[in-house]
Image (cartoon, grey):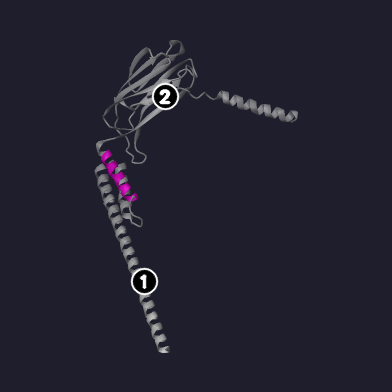
Amino acid sequence: MNSTRCSKLFALLLVATLALSAVAPATAISTKGKDVPSDAKVGDSVTATMTLTDLYSNYEEWTLQGKTELTDVTWTVTTYDQAGNQKAKKSYDGRTFNHSLALDSDASKAVVKVSGTVPEVENFSYDPQQAFTFAKLSQTRKGGNTEEIDTWTANYHTEDSRNARNAIAAAQGAIDDASSGANTKEAQSSLDDAISAYNGENFDLAANLADKAKKSANSASDKAQQSEQQNKLLMYGGIAVLVIIIIGGAGFWYRSQQQNNYRLR
C-alpha cells in the first residue's frame, strides 16, 4: 500500500470517527413496565409503574422527563440505592414532569408510578386500532439533547366501540373460516361497510352490519359444504354405475364365450 492510499484511508477513518462522535449516545437505561394495560376503557382509572436501572450509563447528572395522555394525572418518582433502601420520593401533578437525578445522590434505581384516567378517543380507527400514550420517559442532560428512554402505549375503547369491534372480528373470523369454494363476496362487502361505519363512530350500525356479514359467511359456507357433499355423492354414484356396467359387461362376455365354446363342441 503506497503513501497516497494510506493517506486516503486515514482521512476516511478520521471522518468516520468525527461523525460517530457527533452523534448523541443512545440511552443505555434499562426499563421494565408493570401493570401497563394493553387495552383500557375510556373514563377508567389506571395505575402502572416503570422501573429504571443503569441510570448513569451516559451521564452522571441528568433530568428524567415524563409525558402521558392520561387525564387527572399524578406521577410519583421513588429512588433506591443498590441495597434497595429508599433514598427519596417526590410526586408531581399534570401530564408532564421533570425530575433531577445525580450519581452523587446514591440513587441507583428509579421507580416511576403514574396514575390517571383514560382519555376520550379523538379519532376512532378499526385498523390500526386507536391507541394513546400511556407513558413516555426521556433523558435530558443539562444544555444537551433529549433522548427517549421508553414509551408505553395502550389501546382504548368505549363500551359501544368494543362491542362493534368484537362483532367485526367475529365476522372476519367467519369469512376466514368459510369452507373452500364458499362465495363470501356478499359477506365481505357487509364487513367492509361495518368497518367504515366503525371508523365513522356509528357503532350500532357497525355491529349490525358485522352480524349480517357473519351470517352471510356462515350461510355461504354451509352451501359450499352441501354442494361438496352432493358432488361426492354424484361421483360415488357414477363410480358405482361404472362398476356395475363393467361387471355386467364382463358377465355378458363370459357367457358369450361359454356359448361359443359349447357350439364348437
- Which one is earlier in the sequence, the residue at label 2 or at label 1? 2
Write down the residue under mark 1.
Answer: 243
Q: Residue at x 64, y 25 (%)?
A: 14
| Callout 1 crowding tier (Cα within 10 Å): few <14, some 14–19, many ≥20 | few
108, above or below 14, in the image:
above
Give the distance between the C-alpha atoms of the residues marked 2 and 1, in whole angstroms: 74 Å
What amino acid is found at the position of numbered circle 2 in the picture? Answer: Thr
Q: Nearer the viewer, residue 13 or 246?
A: 246
What amino acid is found at the position of numbered circle 1 in the picture? Answer: Val
User: Can you give x and y, in whole percent of width and height, for residue 48 in the image?
Assistant: 33, 25
User: Can you give x and y, in whole percent of width and height, for residue 146 in the image?
Assistant: 46, 22
* Residue span colored magenta: 162-176
Residue 31, which numbered label? 2
Mark nearer the viewer, 2 or 1: 1
Left or right: 5 in relation to 146: right
Residue situated furthest front in the rendering = 265
Left or right: 5 in relation to 187: right
Residue situated furthest right in the rendering = 2
Q: Secondary structure at mark 2?
A: strand
Q: Residue 174 colored magenta?
A: yes
User: Can you give x and y, in whole percent of width and height, for residue 16 in the image?
Assistant: 61, 27
Quarter occupied by the C terminus: bottom left
Q: Secondary structure at mark 1?
A: helix
Q: Residue at x 57, y 25 (%)?
A: 20
Quarter occupied by the N terminus: top right
